[in-house]
Amino acid sequence: MRIQDAVSRRTFMGAVSAALGFLGLEPQGELLSSSLLQGRGQRGQRAGQAGDQGGRRNAEDYDTLAKLANNENPYGPSESVTKAMTDAFKYANRYGYPDGGVNQAIAQHHNLKSENILTGAGSGEILNAAGQAFLKDHKLVVGAEPTYGSVFSVASGIKKDAIRVPLLPDYRLDIPGIIKATHTHYRDVGFVYICNPNNPTGVIVTKQEIQQLLDGIPGDVPVLIDEAYHHYVNDPNYATSVPYVIEGRPVIVARTFSKIAALAGVRFGYALAPRELIEQMRTYSTGSTSALAKWAVVASLKDGENEAKVKSVTLALREKTTAQLKELGYDVIPSQANFFMVHVKTDITPVIEEFRKRKVLVGRKFPPMDEYLRVSVGNESEMDRFIAAFKEISPGKQQAQAAKTSA
Ligand code: PLP
């Protein structure tokens, strides 16, 4: 057997069985996984490493964990995507190989031109490039608190600062507050970062609010809209911000294949933006993505059927699990994403550890929401394990019972 055949068979068996295990059956392997461990806050991470500590994790141990910490798709890449990667394996030893026209495929998918696309090894790389590019001559990024912390990490890494505008009491982003902060510090602001739906809450910024933001801030301030969880949203008040890019507004939309497309370990993300902004960001990106990732992306863009299946099973499990938590007396923030936050009414640090002891990984702490646990929606058996562990741990039990009696 040729080395290439042997490696190819070994590498892709896991992904194939993961695809076959879709809808109910446990995935057999997670060979393409990015990995995860608790305890490292997003602010402390470098962009492109979505909680990644898998390198230090023992592979056998990893396979036994319910991985509900990093908002991945537990079912693995679809059959067509797996086939595309398997076929692309023959390019593993090459430069300058055919890439399936990945940039054109993305451009076509969004009705844009190739000059409007910047690709990277995950959208983490895109966020990093944006941070480097737009904070170069500026000191500040404006964003919500809490939100996905990658751009804030980039800012602090290059000795720039962030204006963090707290969420409203109903967990929505404070758009008027973000507009005001941008005006107040206009000369110093490099860009505004919006995560929609927001990570860690799963709450959307409505299309009206996006419009209000774009019309409300000075016209030359770029707005980066991170749509990592776009594909899971059902709320009709939400809309992608891609049309603003098409209009030529200074908007950068970031997308990733790490979530619904189940390619977190393969690494591919992209930005859509007017050409001038793409050029500014390009200076800070490696532009280096693998042959497997490129072909996986081309196949994935064509596989709307699998996307719909993943969305439907994920939302059904999200609703089932959150109903169970409510039944136990816990409030859950209504989410439009493949994760949700439950209010456990006690500090979550020891709670996370209790879950870990039961081989369930749950989300990290997102200050100042110290009593809210972020839980990714895994497959059915992972969610059963989560609920069983939750019942055993009964975090903040007394407070929860008190709330249930008074309701
Ligand atoms: N943006 C958001 C909102 C995320 O939650 C994540 C990962 O969890 C990313 C970007 C980065 O993902 P990746 O670098 O895998 O594309």
Image (cartoon, helix red, strand yellow):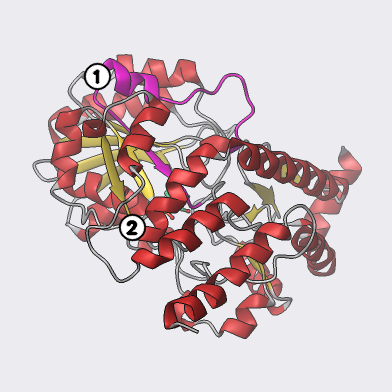
Residue 30 to residue 107: above or below: below
Identify which residue, 328 or 83, lies in the foreground.
83
Residue 63 to residue 17: above or below: below
Q: Amino acid at mark 1?
A: Gly
Q: Is residue 177 left or right of residue 51?
A: left
Categorize mark 2 by other alpha carbons within 10 Å: few (<14), some (14-19), many (20+). many
Q: Position of residue 8 (x, y in %)?
A: 50, 73
Residue 55 to residue 272: above or below: below
Q: Residue furthest front?
A: 1
Q: Position of residue 227 (x, y in %)?
A: 45, 37
Magenta residues span 232-258
Magenta residue check for 257: yes
What distance separates the C-alpha of mark 2 from that of mark 1? 26 Å
Q: Is residue 301 visible?
A: yes
Q: Is residue 331 left or right of residue 348?
A: right
Q: Amino acid at mark 2?
A: Ala
Q: Secondary structure at mark 2?
A: loop
Categorize mark 1 by other alpha carbons within 10 Å: few (<14), some (14-19), many (20+). some
Question: Looking at the image, how many numbered discs can be counted on the residues?
Answer: 2
- What residue lies at 27% left-to-right and 27% top-to-bottom? 113
Q: Position of residue 165 (x, y in %)?
A: 39, 37
* Badge 2 residue CB within 8 Å of ligand 1: yes
| Label whose residue precedes the other's in the sequence (2 or 1) | 2
Q: Is residue 172 left or right of residue 353?
A: left
Magenta residue check for 54: no
Q: Position of residue 343 (x, y in %)?
A: 69, 50
Identify which residue, 341 or 177, lies in the foreground.
341
Q: Secondary structure at mark 1?
A: loop
Q: Is residue 149 visible?
A: no
Q: Which residue is mark 2?
A: 47
Q: Which residue is mark 1?
A: 248
